[in-house]
Image (cartoon, rainbow, N blue to C red):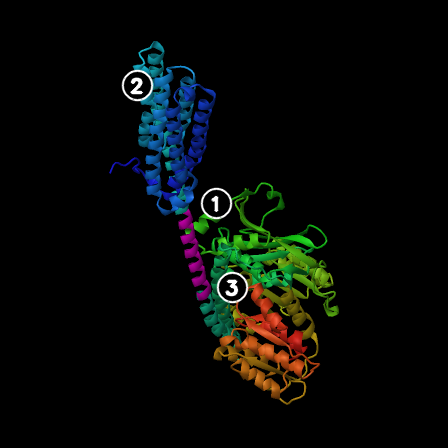
Amino acid sequence: MFELFTPSCKVQKDRQVIHDTDARVAKYSRRGLILNFLVFALSLVFGGFFARETNLAVVLVTGLLLVTLLRSYYLFRFEILYSRAPRRWRTQYFLASFLGAIWWSVILVSLTWVLGMRDEALIMWLYTVVFYSSVANVFSPYIRFLKIYLFIGMIPAAVTALMLATVEGALYASIMVMFYVMLVHQAKVTGSGYWERLEVNFILDERARGLENEQKSSRAAIDLKNEFLVNLGHEFRVSLNDILGTLSLVDNADLSDRQRDLLSMATKAGERQLDLVNNVVDFSKITTKSLELDESVFDLRRLVSKLVRDFSLEAHQQGVELNYLLDAELPARVKGDAARLRQITGSLLSHALKFSVTGNVFVEVTFDSADENKGELQIVISDSHYHRTDEAKAEVDESRLQEAEQTGRVGIGLAISKGLAECMDGSVHLLKTPSGGNRILINVNLEAISHQGKTLGADQRLRGKRLLLVDLPDRVAMDLLDELSNWGVEGQTVYGYEQAVAKVQTCRSDGEPIDCVIIYNRLNSFNALALSRELAKDESTAALKQIIAMSVLQRDTDEVQEHLQAHRQVSCLEKPIIYKQLYEALSQRLVLQEEPESDSPEPVAPIVPVADEPGIKRVLVVEDHRVNQMVASGMLKKLGCYVQLVNSGPEAVAILEKERFDMVLLDSELPEDSGLSAVIKIREQEKTNNSRRRIPVIAMIPDLSEEQISELFSAGFDDQINKPLRYEALEGRVQRWLNIDSASV
């Protein structure tokens, strides 16, 4: 079968493209169909052909009407017929159009043969030229059909004009043939351009769909990976919870100092592993933009001091001197995500320690108040201390940060830190100063709750005491002198053995003797130990109190331990110097040891809480994991509470109906949502019994979203505590809800 249209490229095989092309053909054909009939009818009415050849005119009009009705059937019912069989519609419509072109050719031949090239014949010729010009543009995508269609409609009329054997006829015939050739050529160009344009658009659409599918596949893969990481992180957290919880229970055992240090090292290592797991989960949340911050009020100074202290052992293991300074205007309490801030600073501090090139890492914390409440916290971690004059000359060195992320030398810590800082409306930058020092700048926005700087209160018995600071780093010494002044202590600084001995003797001869010497011991040396020995040997300074600031690793050496045992006036303080620890050490050395010693009391056995003993708080722990039960129970007993354990929510509801408890610690993820059901039933019981007392129910939760936590509070929980349980966090909940002072336990 002869095909009028054969698809030759992908776009011509696309159903939507062909449908749009055919719909365009049908749209313009409907207009031409009606116009053809009206033009011929009007030419008969106003011309003389009808009067001259009435029978022929009637036949021509009737035939045109029938052909018009036939083509109208395919055009005005396009959507219905086309949806059934697109190819059949196209073929049948093309055949109907051929029939229309044949009949139009009959009309034009009849008028030309009867009237010659004048009157209505000229009008019809002119209209035919205009009509087929528009038709050529519309039908140009189907060039094979168009050639035949134009040939049928135009060439027979040209042959008839030529048969008139007149000059006018020959002229019009040649013009018609030339016009036919021009229309075919124009249609070829237009049709070719039409399909090429659609082909380009089709390829672009295919690529766009391919990219969209790839994006969906990538997103699905990322979602699957993130879900796997979150689930894996949960499993690791459960295991680490058991380890850290068990280690926390060993704290009160009868251990030596060395054993306690080893236990502390194991606990910190476990906590670092837990932080690593949390980093992996956070990374997945940052990539999916699903991270939610926890806004709470916290002690900023305590957070930074504890963080630096936690990294002191790692710093000394890396052979790095670690020191820090807190701005005097630093607010005491701020509102923000303390855990995220600790995570950012800890990760970047670990990076700075690991890749330090100077062997000195300095942490400086400042707070720039934007208004009364809001402000920007800036934490600068530098390889060595820098001068503020270098600030403007510092160059951004983000390439190192990007290189570190790409090479993976520090895992995902840097990438997570940047993401977390941006979530907190802040930033992380690496700077390089002209002096060669490298700095990491951390900026986050926080809300200041208490603007008053937090300082330790002065002990009246410390007032007037004189301290000599030996070999302390300059900025540390200057800041410490200011802090000592707040305590009512007079401090002076010297460097080296000779200056120290000379200063001690000078002060004694002036009637203002030194009460205590603080000696800073450098890494990879025992300069402080040598000075301490000399002071201890000299009769004039033998009784002088000494505090040596050194690392845990240095303190645990046999040489240092022998020196401490031989000279009771000498004690050690862990570096970096934490002001609270120094304050307690000075109070111990200069105040308590100077008071008359009383007989040492006999050791008292630890008090074991008894259920019926007055004043003992009763806590019900609802937990199905044995190790978690042991951890929670051990911590609560350390806090002086009586503890009873149950495994499920229904058991908890049943026992609360019979016995009275002061607090319930309930796992929020018990099987079959029994934890959630339990707290709902507990609240229903309180309403049923018209109880005026609402028992505090604390949810032990993993890393949940804000929405999930809100659901827990809506169900009836009063507070939450994260798992794995930390002693400090549990202590805070007990103090809040049971009014237990842990210092008295």
- Mark 1 belongs to which amino acid? Ser
Determine contact: label 2, label 3, CB under 8 Å.
no
- Mark 3 belongs to which amino acid? Leu
Instruction: Assess disc 3: are there few (<14), some (14-19) or many (≥20) residues with their C-alpha within 10 Å of its C-alpha.
Output: many
> Mark 1 against mark 3, which lies toward the viewer?
1
**In screen coordinates, is 557 left or right of 535?**
left
Any magenta on residue 229?
Answer: yes
- Where disc 2 sits, the SS reads helix
Q: Quadrant of residue 338?
A: bottom right
Any magenta on residue 500?
Answer: no
* In front of the other: 46 or 386: 46
Q: Name the residue under label 3.
A: 313
Residue ranking furthest to the top: 167
Nearer-N-terminus badge (2/1): 2
- Where disc 3 sits, the SS reads helix
Task: Give coordinates of residue 645: x percent, y percent.
Answer: 54, 83
- The N terminus: image quadrant: top left
Q: Is residue 732 above or below residue 605?
A: above
Q: Name the residue under label 2.
A: 159
Q: Name the residue under label 1.
A: 399
Instruction: Assess disc 1: are there few (<14), some (14-19) or many (≥20) residues with their C-alpha within 10 Å of its C-alpha.
Output: few
Task: Give coordinates of residue 269: x percent, y percent.
Answer: 48, 67
Which portion, as a residue range, is magenta?
Answer: 211-231
Tell me how far mark 2 sits from mark 3, CA to CA. 107 Å
The residue under the point 51% across, 54% down is: 352
- The C terminus: image quadrant: bottom right
